[in-house]
Amino acid sequence: MDHLNKQQWEYLEEKYISRTRKCVPDKFQEMCHMHLAFLLDLSGDKLEQLLVSGEQPQTKRKLGLSSAVNVFKKKEKAPTGLFGAPLTDESVCLMLPLIRFLKAEKHVCKEGLFRKPGHRLRMNALRDSLNVHGTATRLDPEVYSPYDVAGVLKEFLRELPEPLLTDKHMEAHRQIQEMGKHVSTEEAVQRFAKKKLSALQLLMLLVPTPARKMTLQVLWLLQRVADCPETRLTPTTLGTLFAPVFFLDRDLDAQEMCTAVSQAEPGLAFMIQHAHLLFKVISLMAHMGLGCGVKGPVQVNCRPWRRPDYWCHK
């Protein structure tokens, strides 16, 4: 059989894992959880929390607070629009033009992007346009500045009802953030960095599709912002600005929020620095049995039961 080059192999691996997720989702999640258990402490309730549907805890929390908050009419109306509603594929699509606008060379290197505020009236106009006109909203650079668009994107993410990386994965992320804190040698630091990256890659496979799409786009944008020296923003600075979006409970008070941000910032800074690798499944395939697992020149005639398309017919 013909040999595949690296690019062709990566394409096949991406195709295999996508097909596995669709054809045998239960088996796919089981394998991800199994390999996460080798990297993290998921004993007892921790594993159950990771496996449970994300809908249940959220519903219980809302029911428990309904009698206390139903007098605030604005709070009730917020989820009916784009802002404040649970993340969906449709809302991700509405945010993609904003992200593309900010990725443009003349916008992404603006000093203090995401840190400096936009113009409130223009931001409100953009919010209203997104709610009313949806994908027909036109981002005219003569009307909206990069700071306006960045401010609206950040508000959309902050008003999500749960962290972007989902409530049920927070224990796993907490453990990942603790990895390697006790080590001092460069060799040990690198070893734990690889372990953290592997765990994060597995978690990215388990995140619901809308959250995974949005996480990918936002992290790639933040990495570009951090790589541009004109912005004067580092991964650490951006980690502080966006930690509430990715990790934090929406019900924390100001003091708890401040403490939680300082704890979560290094974890998000790590994700921004490695954004180009977080969604690369190629390095995980050999360990998960979803690909051939052959290093070097790859041949097509690998064992059929190691391929997701084999399981699709079972």
Image (tube, rainbow, N blue to C red):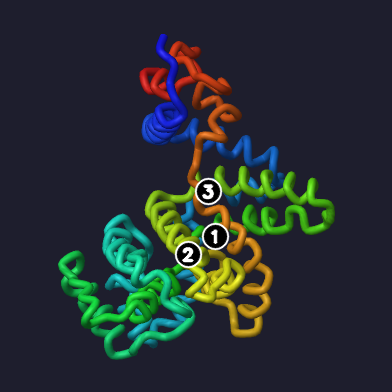
**What is the x, y in percent for residue 309?**
39, 22
Total number of numbered discs in the rendering: 3
Q: As drawn, is 249 to the left or to the right of 95? A: right
* Amino acid type, label 3: Leu
Mark 3 in CB contact with mark 2 (< 8 angstroms) = no
Q: Which residue is under mark 1? A: 272
**What is the x, y in percent for residue 108?**
40, 69
Going from the N terminus, do you reach mark 1 or mark 2 first?
Answer: 2
- What is the distance, in whole Å, between disc 1 and disc 3 at their CAs? 9 Å
Say which element carries label 2. helix
For the point 76% across and 51% down, the residue is 189
Going from the N terminus, do you reach mark 1 or mark 3 first?
Answer: 1
Task: Assess disc 1: are there few (<14), some (14-19) or many (≥20) residues with their C-alpha within 10 Å of its C-alpha.
Answer: many
Q: Is residue 59 visible?
A: no
Say which element carries label 3. helix
Q: Which residue is under mark 2? A: 222
Going from the N terminus, do you reach mark 3 or mark 2 first?
Answer: 2
- What is the distance, in whole Å, between disc 3 and disc 2 at their CAs? 13 Å
Say which element carries label 1. helix
- What is the distance, in whole Å, between disc 1 and disc 2 at their CAs? 6 Å
For the point 47% across and 34% down, the residue is 26
Q: Residue furthest top?
A: 1
Mark 1 in CB contact with mark 2 (< 8 angstroms) = yes
Q: As drawn, is 173 to the left or to the right of 62? A: right
Would you place residue 152 above or below residue 33 in this image? below
For the point 71% across and 45% down, the residue is 43
**What is the x, y in percent for residue 143?**
22, 82
Q: Is residue 160 visible?
A: yes
Q: As drawn, is 76 to the left or to the right of 300? A: left
Front of the two marks 3 and 2: 2
Name the image quarter holding residue 194.
top right
